[in-house]
Image (tube, coloured by chain):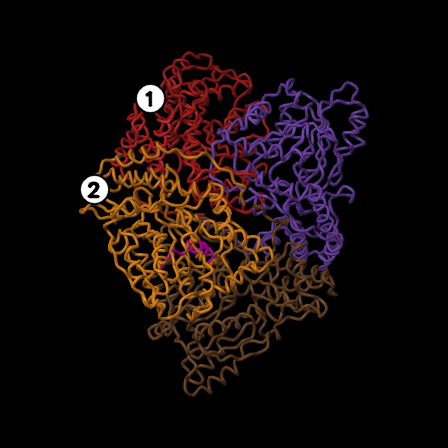
Chain colours: A brown, B orange, C red, D purple
Amino acid sequence: MQTKFRTGTAHLFIPGPTNVPADVQRAMIVPMQDHRAPDFADLLGPVLDGLKPVFGTRGGRIALFPGSGTAAWEAAITNTLCPGDKVLMARHGQFSDLWAQMAQALGLRVEAIDVAWGAPCPVTEIARRLGADRMGEIRAVFVTHNETATGVTSDVAGVRHALDSCFHDALLFVDGVSSIGSIPFEMDAWGVDLAIAGSQKGLMCPAGLGILAASPRALDAMATSTMPRSFLDLRAMLGAHDAGSFCFTPPAQLLHGLRAALARLRAEGLDAVYARHHRLATGIRAGIGALGLQTVAEHPLFASDTVTAIRTPQDVDAREVIAIARDRYNTHFGAGLGPLAGRAFRIGHLGDLNEGMCLTALGIAELSLKAAGARVDLGAGLAAAQAVFAAQPLAPALSIAAE
Amino acid sequence: MQTKFRTGTAHLFIPGPTNVPADVQRAMIVPMQDHRAPDFADLLGPVLDGLKPVFGTRGGRIALFPGSGTAAWEAAITNTLCPGDKVLMARHGQFSDLWAQMAQALGLRVEAIDVAWGAPCPVTEIARRLGADRMGEIRAVFVTHNETATGVTSDVAGVRHALDSCFHDALLFVDGVSSIGSIPFEMDAWGVDLAIAGSQKGLMCPAGLGILAASPRALDAMATSTMPRSFLDLRAMLGAHDAGSFCFTPPAQLLHGLRAALARLRAEGLDAVYARHHRLATGIRAGIGALGLQTVAEHPLFASDTVTAIRTPQDVDAREVIAIARDRYNTHFGAGLGPLAGRAFRIGHLGDLNEGMCLTALGIAELSLKAAGARVDLGAGLAAAQAVFAAQPLAPALSIAAE
Amino acid sequence: MQTKFRTGTAHLFIPGPTNVPADVQRAMIVPMQDHRAPDFADLLGPVLDGLKPVFGTRGGRIALFPGSGTAAWEAAITNTLCPGDKVLMARHGQFSDLWAQMAQALGLRVEAIDVAWGAPCPVTEIARRLGADRMGEIRAVFVTHNETATGVTSDVAGVRHALDSCFHDALLFVDGVSSIGSIPFEMDAWGVDLAIAGSQKGLMCPAGLGILAASPRALDAMATSTMPRSFLDLRAMLGAHDAGSFCFTPPAQLLHGLRAALARLRAEGLDAVYARHHRLATGIRAGIGALGLQTVAEHPLFASDTVTAIRTPQDVDAREVIAIARDRYNTHFGAGLGPLAGRAFRIGHLGDLNEGMCLTALGIAELSLKAAGARVDLGAGLAAAQAVFAAQPLAPALSIAAE
Amino acid sequence: MQTKFRTGTAHLFIPGPTNVPADVQRAMIVPMQDHRAPDFADLLGPVLDGLKPVFGTRGGRIALFPGSGTAAWEAAITNTLCPGDKVLMARHGQFSDLWAQMAQALGLRVEAIDVAWGAPCPVTEIARRLGADRMGEIRAVFVTHNETATGVTSDVAGVRHALDSCFHDALLFVDGVSSIGSIPFEMDAWGVDLAIAGSQKGLMCPAGLGILAASPRALDAMATSTMPRSFLDLRAMLGAHDAGSFCFTPPAQLLHGLRAALARLRAEGLDAVYARHHRLATGIRAGIGALGLQTVAEHPLFASDTVTAIRTPQDVDAREVIAIARDRYNTHFGAGLGPLAGRAFRIGHLGDLNEGMCLTALGIAELSLKAAGARVDLGAGLAAAQAVFAAQPLAPALSIAAE
């Protein structure tokens, strides 16, 4: 077998999977084990408990589905809704769009609000539609908390407020795949009924687990849901979790990884984790601005702290920027998706990240943009980011009782 | 965090996940990578190609679904059948039973043939039912190639012969989760339409990937299938595979592992792999017989070469045998499932295995049985297995160009 | 690059390096770090402290030398003795012989007592020589606590008693490479002045560190020692250790491994570790006896609990036994060394070991002996070992706060 | 056990140990093996052969000593010289100084030429002393090819020329610990008799192996050398290597790592490796210059391509710069050693390195210098380095048949 390599660290700035910390990587190097043995619960239990604060829930239940965030999306739908149910959602990026496609494929009626890629979920319009829904036809509202394609964060609390203001009892589904673990997420406070995450972003593990958190109301909805489901049956999985295991053979190594990653989040403290993501994202955005480039996010107010989508100048193909970064500098940026292909590239800045890594991202972005024909001043973005970082020093080292 | 440990190697003899070879374990320790980068195809392509001979197919297509074998089961159903379709299958163990439950949950009509746990798929009765199906109502026949709960291998070729004899065009689904990669599987020769495996048994990787092989006829059936599906959509996944990637973030580390595991199978040679499994299983069965114990498999003719389910004497609780092995000897046997709980334990003998490991399995089984009250002669089973092994020496070391 | 492989676990029963437990292996997978940074002491300190109880010392100092046990041997000599000094020692195996050769190469006068390979250190004769040394010419007595070549343990306390009885003030050097961490070692109680170990035996790590423990008297001797030394200078290394580091770049990954291995020894408890080694060794010896074979150790009273050297029948070449075990069964035994080449093979049974592993060792030894022409009853040794194990069950699982 | 951590990659810019590439790290995760088994030669042989071109030798012999570069230094001396021999060497940094101390400790007479820290080996003065040595008292000349403390590379070929010009037959010893594998080294062409390296710098492995290359003349000198030696006996080790093993238990995992590292060097090509080190070093030096800082190296002509020592402004304590980088930014620079403590810090830029990593080094150096009170323009150094990198793009990805 041939293996390609480039020299030095492969700098990974896609918005997931993210860089796995060395101790999380290490924790996953385990011999296989019997997932039906009584001590398996000693592994699973702390992971399920440890995820709750990350989701911001005390009363919700957590289920882990081998698969990915997409599996958790599907499980959220098929376990709580019925064929033909109407769901309300905005389409404002690749991932909200895919979610709408999934809803249709699974037999839901999708009332979609199409807004510009770069805008957040239009809370006012959501509120208007909910208010207009006199017959209560809308069974659920889907919100993409953080649109990974555009680098835009939406106001979930605002949507909850819209629901409450018109006393609407639709379930609130939230895709938190690229937000949970990196920016504040308050499932209970926001009245989220189904929240979805994956193992491979803020949770700093490889892909392979979809994570679903369900509110008591969502759990009640299981009783009336008539969608066919088997592999992703939530009731069965929660029952298996109660018994300390899974319905079928789980990727146990990822549980070991998640346990270690949760220990890191706890040691750093969630507030510090969120503050760090904000500080680093502010530096990245300052750098992009200093280069005279625009973000896809239309306003800094809703620019995401986990991923920044950057428009390239009109005559510069973003695909070439990405290819130069990858082939010359062993640095990996995310591609512009859908209509943004060739017109934007993305810097993922979530998970296990620090200032030095962000300087690599900006510095290589500058070099690659310039090589692709953009008129940027080398070093200008870096200096702007450094100025941000210099103003807000990092906290000292943390301690962790690992494994 | 507290970690429990026992001294020495944890001897794992459950029928999956199986022991991951050191080089496969090593191959999975990789930094995260961009699954949308062009070089991802260099990883995925050889894995898909390398799986084909293991499934015994040239004309079939392989799809990998993050999840497990259960996900592949569901994908097989939802991508080729329609709600209300009738499927014919035998129930003769825990896993064939679960498969029938899944079929029902997904809206199929299940015509189940219940036979004793310990018997194989009743080919004659299958043939009779197919012959009686004048209206062609049966859309698919489901066969569990290797019933992991009972240690029984069924005659898939025989079922194909039954279908052909009465010119029945039902699709042939085969669960090969605990057989593929360990005992001969001939998808093309047997006319299997949908074959299912997981990463964690004969393929010697951790759990996390369900593997689905589809024949040209099965691919045609996608066009008419009306079952709702999204996460497990086969057409979308095959399209993504054609483009060198997945529909969503895959567990890339498992692809690295599979690549290494397939290299091992190739280096040993599939015929040698199958011969080894047969030799080691013969030794295990000789040992069990010499101890005066019965297997759940009702006849040696269909005893599985990958797992042996052993009935404990009437006054001996199999759960105690398992607990003693685990707690005193750091050795893990599979539990008796369903009606066999407490009445049988299972020795998995598949994947990366050799004579020395089988002696551990038998020796610790003897010690644990005796400690649980069984009247067995210590060493009797071991001597019988050694006699088998002495008669058939192993081949010499193999070479592999790894990574 | 080609890699050879055989199927299944490689069963390693050489007397070192021993099997590295999965958590120790994992602990060593660390990014490189600055050994001059202030937090390096947080790693080194606990390792040095944790080694003290394993050596049975409170008042001694521990120094780690990158290299091996041989380096520690040399450091013991060159830091405390002077050219031309007379040392008294027995030669009764390959390793005591090598130690005598080293002493000569380094300019000492060696008064060697040659006894049969298979006998322990002759305490009575040592006492006689010490008593006869009216002029106090003997500056040191060298004792090989556990002769790895013959599987013989010697009576260090007896040698101390001999020294004390004639008020002799020679330094007492003890090679504990294959004993420390596996069988009781009481540096302080036995009045050992220089004790030597390596990382790769009872300490369950890869090779790469020689460990030297020095008594206060040994430390005093540094002042008068005139042997040239630089790389292995003990005073410099202790000074560096006091400052939390090494004199030169150390293999830091081994310190991480040692830290994890020491945590295991502590969690199991040293007394339990010693009892386990004795139980397993008793089983191995019972098995060898039941096969009608002789050990090199001339009497069970001084048979080692960490390694057993087994004489093959007159017409059976031990090298063939070893080759068959390795090539057919992926099982590795130690060779007969020096005059025992071809006449004996060795089973190492130290470190991270349990009953199941010992059954593999015996079972494969039986198969290999028989294939090499020995008349042994397959299973006879196994049954005898099982009888030992059945009589003395293992303790339950241990807990460890790892990393 | 508590483990300290900081978020994100730990950026390591000490001049060794260097960053271990992921595939080299992976290659070292191996079960223990029998170093006396016949297949051990399959591992050792290619490592010894693969090192030869890195040392630039065909006719020399390579020996590996468990330990470190310091062990190889000592082995070079004790195997070829005699007590009282005179050696000629320059002292112009910490490591040349330590080497002189070792020579004295081992009983040599050292004729030292003290030059400024920051200057290279004074070839003209060396030539003068050799010319003056009419009696041929000087038995060896010691040259530190790359003074790691000052970041200065010396002219080994010039010293050879000096020797040849006056027909002096002293042995030529060269410390290549921080040069070999990163900058050109031509043992044969330069007539080097004893060349020394370690596993942990240009060879990209953890510390633990000292590497000694000996010319035919050096091997001849073993016959007349009268220094005591045992652990580091070269003749014995070469004999063991010829037999495919070591004199004592080696750290086999490092051999696996070295094999993988050598495969990387071969795949990249040594000329490309050297060109890369030069390009990256040029960028670093451009950055330092743009910040208005001085290097310890007194002239760019002999500035090292593997490490740069940077003087801090008069009122800035280099120790504070280092502490800020470490504690706030998880970035590790080397300390100023000896008289440079507090007055300089060092950036190691050798081994597995690329542009993105160098930008991190410079960017964090800027931030840390500023925080410590230096008047530097944030971004100025980065822009200068980027300009260097933009002018010389990297080659594309390399292929390797790994393991």
Examine the image and state in which quarter residue C387 appears. top left
Looking at numbered disc 1 in the image, what kind of residue is underneath it? Gln
Can residue B59 be seen in this snapshot?
A: yes
Image quadrant in which the C terminus of chain B is located? top right
Task: Please check whether the numbered discs 2 and 1 fall on a single chain.
Answer: no
* Numbered disc 2: secondary structure: loop
Alpha carbon separation for disc pair 2 and 1: 33 Å
In percent of width and height, residue B127 lies at 31, 58
> Which residue is at a point 47% across and 82% down the rendered structure image?
A162
Local crowd size for mark 1, using a 10 Å CA cut-off: few (<14), some (14–19), many (≥20): some
- In the image, residue D357 above or below residue A137: above
Examine the image and state in which quarter residue D191 appears. top right
Q: Is the magenta stretch mostly helix, strand or loop?
A: helix
Q: Is residue B51 left or right of residue D342?
A: left
In percent of width and height, residue A377 lies at 74, 63
Which span is picked out in magenta? A247-261
Q: Mark 1 points at which residue?
A: C294
Looking at numbered disc 2 in the image, what kind of residue is underneath it? Ala
* Numbered disc 1: secondary structure: loop
In percent of width and height, residue B214 lies at 45, 59
Which one is in front, D7 or C339? C339
Examine the image and state in which quarter residue B305 appears. top left
Q: Name the residue under label 2.
A: B374
